Image: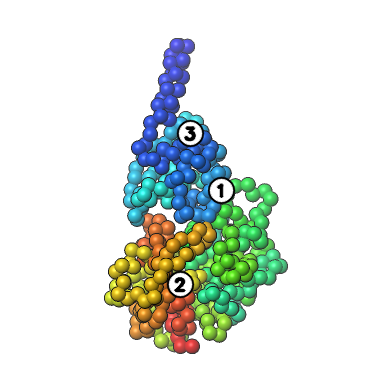
Amino acid sequence: MRKLAYFLLLYCGLARAALAQQPTGVAALDQLVAALNSKSLAPVQPYLTPETRVSGLPATYTGPALARLLPQYGPVEGLRIVRQEPAGPNTRYVCALARQGTEKEVTLVLTPAGQFAELNLVPASTKKIDLAFGPGEIITPPSVVAPARLRNGLLLVEAEVDGRRGTFLLDTGAPALVLNKREFAAPATETTLAATGSTGVNGRMAGMSYHLAQQFDWQGISFQQKQVPTLDLTSLEQKLGGLPLLGLIGYNVLSQYAVTLDYHAGQVLLRQPAPAAAPPAALMRVPFVLSGHLPVVALTVGGQTFQVGVDCGAQANLLDQQYQAGLARELRRAATARLSGADAAARAVATARLPEVRLAGPLVFRKQATVFADMAHLNQNPSRPPLQGLVGYPLLSQYRTTIDYVKKQLYFSAW
């Protein structure tokens, strides 16, 4: 019997060793195992890009997040590919990670170049922040008139958090209210990553930490005792010439309203539409669908149609770089610029002006400043239709624009 027990122990030990020595044949995955076993970022570093994300966190936190997670996971006996499937232009690998005699399923997404787009490794104990407001959690007056000021194509408003009044960016490209991590520290007891489980345009809306807001108020829109994600907003502040931000206001605060962006008058008007009321007079109405938190409409340029998100937090319009060549005859003042995203990483992008574009209607939007850049990081959710671009300040500021989240329509009115 003792010989049998010894044989079983020896067999299990050899089996684990064999598993550890069995490569997957995918370099990035094999180096991830090496990183987990060495508890070092070095083996996997060549397979990370400025857009690599860890479990929905913003790309700027990938290095610190992995440095924190690797010691929690290692050592491991090996990694086995359960299945692989397309994820847009990327490949998703569902893998079994063997550790301490058991297997844990993890999901890893690789780019066509074999680098990580996503590493979904965050342990189950990681805190999840609920972005949605439950019944009675937020006070929403029937109508609000909020003073706003325009700076570098971005709309800024004043709001108050925990007795501190300051500047917030109004951002329809963001899924939620987010606070500046520099200004609002996490609770002293918070030792794990805090993920929202949702990302926004340019990754602005996932947070590595959170703040328990005792009180928030923006022109009567208010709530108390709510955990709010926090994010390093330094790159946004740089776009605003160094203006300090307390945070930004996104979809979870705006979703019950028709939001009018009045760039000329310096106001944001919010109105709760009555279900049976006739819509306001407008030069043009355009229906939209919501992709997550983002309104999506059809944009026509040079006879081509693109599905684009509506984002007042975008200083320029954006189209995926793959469409630049096909629109070459339409482009004016083509140039190259350095663009910094929410992760503060600068990238070379093509810029141009489109003489005119249209939505679904008679209005023409002229002289549209547009950036052509890789949008793969915005299209990694297979359950949502892919976006081909974004429309921001150049289009939204040509008319008095209303985003009606309740009736899912854009209204364009004369100034």
Q: Amino acid at mark 3?
A: Val
Structural distance between the alpha carbons of marks 2 and 3: 46 Å
On screen, residue 415 versus residue 230, left or right, reads: left
For label 1, the residue is 64
Q: Residue at x 42, y 48 (%)?
A: 116
Q: Residues within 10 Å of mark 1 (few under 14, many from 20)?
A: few
Q: Residues within 10 Å of mark 2 (few under 14, many from 20)?
A: many
Q: Are marks 3 and 1 in contact (CB under 8 Å)?
A: no
For label 2, the residue is 316
Q: Nearer the viewer, mark 2 or mark 3?
A: 2
The image position of residue 119, as x and y in percent, is 46, 47
- Establish if 366 lies above or below 182: below
Q: Amino acid at mark 2?
A: Ala
- Establish if 182 lies above or below 23: below
On screen, residue 225 versus residue 362, left or right, reads: right
The image position of residue 259, as x and y in percent, is 51, 77
Q: Are marks 2 and 3 in contact (CB under 8 Å)?
A: no
- Which one is earlier in the sequence, the residue at label 2 or at label 3? 3
The image position of residue 168, as x and y in percent, is 60, 70
